[in-house]
Amino acid sequence: MQHITYKNCDIFLPMPVFPVIEDVGWWQGEDGSAAQQPYRNAFPRRHCLADYQALVRLADRLGIRIALGMVLCEWDRDNVLAGIKGATWMGKHWNNRKNQGPWLDETAEYLHSQRGSLELGLHALCHEFWHEGKMERSEFHDSRGNMRPREMIRSHLEAFGMILEHNGFSEFPRLFFPPALNHSFGNGKESIQALLHDYGIRHVITRFSRAKRFTPPHHEKITWEHGVGILERGLAPVPWHVSASLPHWDFSGPILPLHWGNLLHPDPGLSSDIVDGWADMLLDGATGPEYILSENYDACWRQAALFYFGKLSIDAESIVIDLRALPGDMPSNSGPFFLKTRGRLPISIRSEGAQIISTHLDRGNITTLQLLPEKERARIRILLC
């Protein structure tokens, strides 16, 4: 915990909290793995527009833009995946007819209208990989963390972009959630990060303990290479195949990883009850001084960088936030961050080395300060007058 006490006031550099939802995009609910088909959501019905509306409800309850790990094979309007090696269990005979219907236009239009609440990220085409008709885990890496051939990965990324375009989405995602948590990093220009960067991916969220690591990460919870940041995902508090789940989480890291079905009820009209439970849990947990609910993934990444590399201290009657350990080559590390205090503050708060963008007093005498560091400033002083 990043915490010091000064003049009967507790000061915290809070850990960011941010939910990500994986396995969004299936239309079929059943888990097909026993029949060499993908691991879907093991959900007892087809997905529908109401399942996306539930995600918007979560985002709006929290007041943030949540990130979605999208699986897009069942959004394929033109059967382009028939020409993509390893993408589906049908191979060149791929036919997505049963998932092509008016719900595609309806849901695409809805997602466009809700871009302020939902950010579409890359998870996979069909989540798995198929070799000679046999399913393997997973699409971009095998279970030992070995990358699929680079040109094959490129073809899958190109197909993902095509399906997005055919559904009216012009921008390739910035976020990548490796399917089945199979990933690798630390091998420089040969890394998948170098390849992802070419397509506009700027962030990866995965479990470091599951990744093949050619070199150690910069920090046990956060690292980067080739302009792509990688943040520890942590353990999901609920198994991927459990629907209508009760909210519980230990706030052990910045990312709350959930799967789509966890938030949904078999009766679409009851999903709001499930979503509201998770929203209440997150809002209650983040009101304390130790945590801050991030408004989007960029804010989460910046706050995580400060949380892991920054240092709080007291010097000459002021609070010092030392940023000297923050590596200069870390991507996307400029911008505002948050400080929290607990206790009665003086009438005046001044800052040297950063602009105070906002202050907000919450219940329990907790004040949230948003600070924007001056360019290349390594030490920030907060003076309580």
Image (cartoon, rainbow, N blue to C red):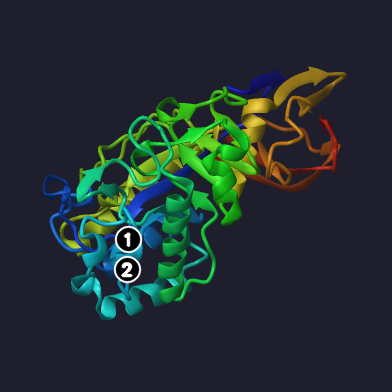
* Quadrant into which the N terminus falls: top right
- Residue topped by disc 1: 25
Q: Quadrant of residue 159?
A: bottom left
Asked whether, in this view, residue 43 is left or right of residue 277, the answer is left
Sequence order check, earlier mark of 2 and 1: 1
Q: Describe the element under mark 2 as helix, strand or loop.
A: helix
Crowd class of label 1 (few under 14; some 14 to 19; many from 20; radius 10 Å): many
Callout 2 touching callout 1 (CB < 8 Å): yes
* Quadrant into which the C terminus falls: top right
Amino acid type for the residue under numbered disc 1 = Gly
Q: Nearer the viewer, mark 2 or mark 1?
A: 2
- Please indicate, yes or no, whether residue 366 appears anywhere in the rendered image: no
Residue at screen point 28% across, 67% down: 50
Crowd class of label 2 (few under 14; some 14 to 19; many from 20; radius 10 Å): many
Q: Is 202 above or below relative to 170? A: above
Amino acid type for the residue under numbered disc 2 = Trp
Asked whether, in this view, residue 127 is left or right of residue 210, the answer is left
Asked whether, in this view, residue 254 is left or right of residue 333, the answer is left
Q: Is 267 above or below relative to 237? A: below
Separation (CA) of disc 2 from disc 1 = 8 Å
Q: Residue 292 at x, y = what percent?
A: 56, 39
Residue 75 - label? 2
Q: Describe the element under mark 1 as helix, strand or loop.
A: loop
